[in-house]
Amino acid sequence: MKFDEIKSRFVNFLKERDWEKYHTPKNLCISLLIELAELAEFFQWKSDEEIEKIMNNPSEVEKISEELADVFFYLLSLCNTLKIDLLTAAEKKLKKNIEKYPAELVKGKAHKYTYYQKNVNKED
Ligand SMILES: [Mg+2]
């Protein structure tokens, strides 16, 4: 299913239930955080090895997939309510990040971009 199709089907899902009136920016931000917390619970206090075991369990992967879908739908609805095109926003942000984090400067490093601005002449 393409992005526009799932978006359209989701908007219809809301309209058919008259739920759009509840989808205010505040409610959607809170709902998005709650769904993200539900997702994070699967990984809370787990080592990388334990997470790997979880991800090898199909029923756990299914549950995690459902939480990811919940996050996706609330993000989609928030963008819809705010009249922001998510794909356009993502494309613009990716371009900015490419400029902010030049691969030749940051490869293999995980500093915030301000680190590179301060240390650009100190890098070897
Ligand atoms: Mg959920």
Image (tube, grey):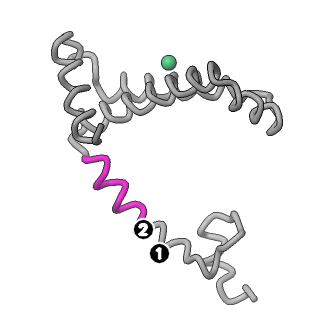
Which residue does the numbered mark 1 point to in the structure image? 99
Report the residue at 68% width, 65% height from top.
111
Which image quadrant for residue 80?
top left
Tell me which residue sits at (66%, 71%) in the image.
Answer: 115
Q: Is residue 8 magenta?
A: no
Q: Main secondary structure of the magenta part?
A: helix
Q: In the image, 110: left or right of 25? A: right
Reply yes or no: does residue 94 show up in magenta. Answer: yes
Say if mark 1 contacts mark 2, CB within 8 Å: yes
Residue labelled 2 has its Cβ within 8 Å of some atom of ligand 1: no
Q: In this view of the protein, which residue sits in the foreground, 116 or 44?
A: 44
Q: Quadrant of the N terminus?
A: top left
Residue at left offset 32%, top offset 35%: 76
Q: Amino acid at mark 1?
A: Glu
Residue 96 numbered mark, or none = 2
**Magenta highlight range:** 85-96
